[in-house]
Amino acid sequence: MDDITGEVKGEVNDFVELEFNTSIDEDHDGTELVFAKEYVVGDENGWNYELDYRAWADGKTFYVGDVLDFNYDKEEHNVIVVNTTGYNKCLASPNLGAFDSGNDRISLTTPGKKYYICQWHCDYSDQKLMITVLRKKMLGTPIFSPH
Ligand SMILES: [Cu+2]
């Protein structure tokens, strides 16, 4: 009985090891392996006018495929996706998208600078976020070769 159990465990371990090695091989050409991350904007403080979102974004690296999670009181705030001008001047219109659910998940689908403001508190207390999204060099599967 003990021998049989040992055999089965051995097979399982071999299988796991094989899978593990396959994913390590993706790194053969020095390509950075990056997996999608979800960021709660402001962490436990959420999206409001008490936080410095420049400081929050500082030191974080955002990649295409990552998600921003805006949590806030929908009676108080909103999330407007704007361009540089909108960000600098706190203009909610024209915009690239407006959210007001209180719990908005925004996927970062393209590289470049992204700007988010709260329409009501951007001017009032700098409730705005600017991030730079980098192109992901490679997703987790070896099917696609990097260009
Ligand atoms: Cu606000």
Image (cartoon, helix red, strand yellow):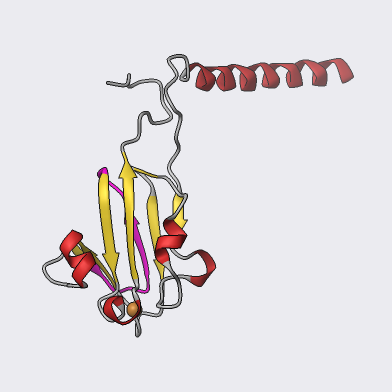
- The spot of residue 132 in percent (x, y) is 32, 48
Q: Position of residue 80 (x, y in %)?
A: 24, 68
Could you say where residue 72 lies in the image, as x and y percent from the top left?
41, 75
In the displayed structure, does residue 55 sit left or right of residue 108?
right
Residue at 40 percent across and 21 percent down: it is 142
Q: Is residue 102 magenta?
A: yes
Q: Is residue 91 above or below residue 63?
A: below
Magenta-drawn stretch contains 47: no
Q: In the picture, which quadrant includes the N terminus?
A: top right
Q: Is residue 68 left or right of residue 91?
A: right
Q: Which one is nearer the viewer's eye here, 17 or 61?
A: 61
Q: Position of residue 66 (x, y in %)?
A: 38, 47
Residue 136 visible here: yes
- Ligand 1 falls in which quarter? bottom left
Residue drawn at 35 percent across, 29 percent down: 137
Please give the name of the residue rendered at 26% of the width and 43% of the height, measured from the top-left corner. Answer: 111
- Residue 55 lies in quadrant: bottom left
Residue 96 visible at all? no
Q: In which quadrant will I find the C terminus?
A: top left
Please tell me in which quadrant of the rendered image residue 20 appears. Answer: top right
Question: In which image quadrant can residue 6 be found?
Answer: top right
Magenta extent: 98-111
- Name the residue nearer the viewer: 51 or 36: 51
Q: Please state which of residues 8 and 142 is positioned toward the viewer in this rendering.
A: 142
Q: Nearer the viewer, residue 2 or 29?
A: 29
Residue extending furthest toward the left: 94
Residue that appears at 35% across and 73% down:
127
